[in-house]
Amino acid sequence: MARALIHLVENGRVLLPKEELHHLVRVRRLKAGDKFEALDVKEGKVYRCTLSKEGGIWHGLILDTLEVDADPPLKITLAQALIKKDKFEWVIQKATELGVSEIIPILTCRTEIRLDEKREQRKLQRWSKIVAEAVNQCGRSRLPILGSPVSLAALLEERTEGLWIVLDEATDFPMRQLLAECHSAENCILLVGPEGGWDDRDREILSAEKAHSVSLGPRIMRAETASIAALAVLQYELGDFNG
C-alpha cells in the first residue's frame, strides 16, 4: 500500500505536504477514494486513510489507526565520521532501514569533509529528506534523530549511558565476543571512523573514555561497509533480527 509522510492531523483528516501529494497522485497514480497509509512523524502514528479531494484540495480521510511495530527495542546511536557525500548519504539511508535511533556525524583528526554553517544547513536538510524517505520505505513509525556534526571529543564529553563500541582495524578483539559479554545491553553507541581510519590522537580520546574497540574480522572494510555490517551484527545479536 502507498505510504505518505504527514505533519498535521486535524478533524479526522491528514494534510498532505506538496511532495507527498505528488508521490501519491503523480507517481503512484492514486485517485480519490483510493486507500493509503499516512505516517505522522511527530507522534509516530500510522493512519489508514482514503484519498479525498474537496474544493481542489487533496487530503486523507482517516479510517483507523494502525498498530505498527517496526522500530526495534534496541536503541542504537550511529556516530559516523563524515565521509564523501554519496557514501555518507548511503550510510544514513541504510542505517535508517536497519533501525538506528539516532545518527550523529562526527569530525575526527582524519576527517577530510569540513562544513561551514551554510553548507551544514544544506546538508542537514538533504540528510533529513533521505532519512524520511528511508523511514517511509521500510515501514518504520518514527524518524531517527539526526544530529549536527560534532567533534569526537565533544561527542564523548556529552557521553550518555550505554555500550560504546568503536570499530577499529588496529584491534583483534572480536565484536561478537564483546556482544556476548554484554548481551543484556539495551542502548549501544557505535562509532565508525573516516576513510583513513582512526588517528592515534582519536584512539587516545577513545581509550580515555573506556570505549570498547572491536574488530569485524581479518579484512579491512571501507568506512561505509563497516558501518552497515556492524549495525546488522548488532541487530542480530542484541536486536530484533533473530525474532
Image (cartoon, grey):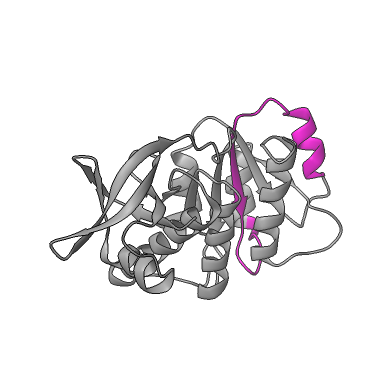
Identify the residue shown where x is 35% and y is 65%: 31
Identify the residue shown where x is 82% and y is 44%: 174
Give x and y (percent) for residue 135: 48, 53
Q: Is residue 158 left or right of residue 238?
A: left
Q: Is residue 40 visible?
A: no
**Quarter of the view holding residue 64:** top left
Towards the viewer: 89 or 208: 89
Q: Is residue 208 left or right of residue 180?
A: left
Specify the farthest residue to the left: 55
Give x and y (percent) for residue 120: 35, 66
Towards the viewer: 154 or 104: 104
Asked whether 180 falls inside the magenta stretch, the response is: yes
Give the magenta-colored segment's residue range: 174-200
Identify the residue shown where x is 67% and y is 37%: 240
Give x and y (percent) for residue 182: 72, 29
Q: Is residue 129 left or right of residue 80?
A: left
Q: Is residue 55 left or right of residue 42?
A: left
Specify the farthest residue to the front: 33
Q: Quadrant of the C terminus?
A: top right
Q: Is residue 160 above or below residue 19?
A: above
Identify the residue shown where x is 61% and y is 46%: 190
Asked whether 213 falls inside the magenta stretch, the response is: no
Towards the viewer: 179 or 25: 25
Q: Is residue 113 visible?
A: yes
